[in-house]
Image (cartoon, helix red, strand yellow):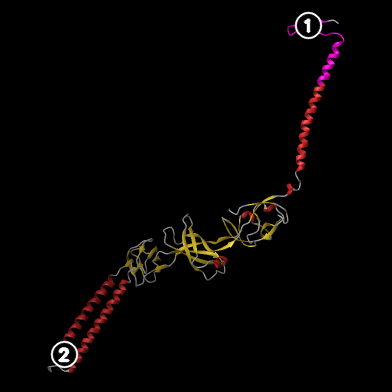
Amino acid sequence: MEYEAKAIDGEDRPQLSGPEAPSRRRRKWIIAAAVLLLLLLVAWVAFGRGDEEGAAAAGAQPAGDSQVPTVSVMVPGRESIQAVVTGTGSLAARREMPIGVAGEGGEVTRVLVEPGSWVGQGQVLASVDRSVQAQTAESLQAQVRVARADARIAQSELDRSQQLLGRGFVSQADIDRKTATRDAAQARVRVAEAQLAETQARNRRLDIRAPAAGLVLTRSVEPGQIVSSGSGTLFRMAMGGQMEMRARLSETDVARVRVGVPAEVTPVGSTATFRGEVWQVSPVIDPDTRQGTVRIALSYDPALRPGGFATARILSGARAAPLLPESAVLSDGKGNYVYVLDDKNRAQRRAVTVGQVSDAGVAIADGLSGTERVVVSAGAFLNPGQKVNPTLRKTGR
């Protein structure tokens, strides 16, 4: 065997030559192939077992359980629910008083109030010129004074005649005549006084006065204007400042409202709410609109302007009924319904009548006793008779 010296990496190493070199290279390829097969075997064992375990785990889960939906249910019970009727309408004076000219009228000399003024009973709102009427009154006062003077003279003459009657200087006939003269003079006094009183009363009616205490709403007269009994309404007042809302309600809602129930009124454009109570329910329903008027009494407030628009919430009473979330109540062509669960957790359709709807939920007027397990979610995806997996939900909303 011959060896040849060859420099590898700066060193002299012997290199095989001759017939042993090919066998050495063959062994190396065999070893490499064996290592590669071993690696492939290890990889197959690792990944193949993981797939089998996953398949076994998947096969261990029953196929039937994956098809039973889980739904949320609740037992609503019965709660006291306040029935609320809502409506719209206009604000107005509860007792509006139109004021015009009560006397013969004339030229307006002064207007003493403005809209929004509070006035007392009998207070002068406007004055009318009375220069001519004042002269007539003075003339009648003079006539009264003359009549009273004549009556005093007649009484004095009668008194003297009665003193002379006992001495025989006058006769009884003279006494009778003087008594009649005295009585006539006193009668003329009363006539003159009555005429004066009538004139003074007419003159007082020239002043336009408030018939009762209250709030001035409108004024349609100015100084210099000629007014008479045909001039119409010069002032409008709200007696005592009392206001009201005239709510227009449907025929059904009117039947649910009673006199004395509380109400809340909110004027348009305002966030303030005013409390009042129903004081009158219209006995007549408009045949065209099928609506009636409910009048709600309100105390005075500057924000309550007659003629304005407002909304009202009328508390028409309370009743005990099941209360459900809106998601629990479904509807279709047959009406409103809910799903309830039987003792085998199967969904059963139940027709219901919906009552008051509020932020708290939907009141069920008819169809539920409150002891049923009612599906509150996912009901739209159920079919009658379908089995479900229920999850009980607390009644607190």
Depth check, front residue: 258 or 267: 258
The picture places residue 266, in percent across and down from the top left corner, at: 48, 58
Q: Is residue 27 visible?
A: yes
Depth check, front residue: 322 or 277: 322
The kind of residue tagged 2 is Gln
The picture places residue 388, in percent across and down from the top left corner, at: 71, 52
The kind of residue tagged 1 is Lys
- Give the residue at mark 1: 6
Residue in the image at 18% along x and 83% along y: 152
Chain-order first, disc 1 or disc 2:
1
Instruction: Please determine whether, in this image, residue 268 is positioned above or below residue 172.
Output: above
Residue 347 is drawn in which quadrant?
A: bottom right
Residue in the image at 16% along x and 94% along y: 171
The picture places residue 389, in percent across and down from the top left corner, at: 70, 51
In-image side of 300 versus 377 (left or right): left
Residue 369 counted in the magenta span:
no
The picture places residue 49, in percent across and down from the top left corner, at: 78, 34
- Give the residue at mark 2: 162
In-image side of 359 versus 131 (left or right): right
Question: Which segment did they paint magenta?
Answer: 3-32
Instruction: Please determine whether, in this image, residue 139 is positioned above or below residue 393.
Output: below
Residue in the image at 27% along x and 72% along y: 134
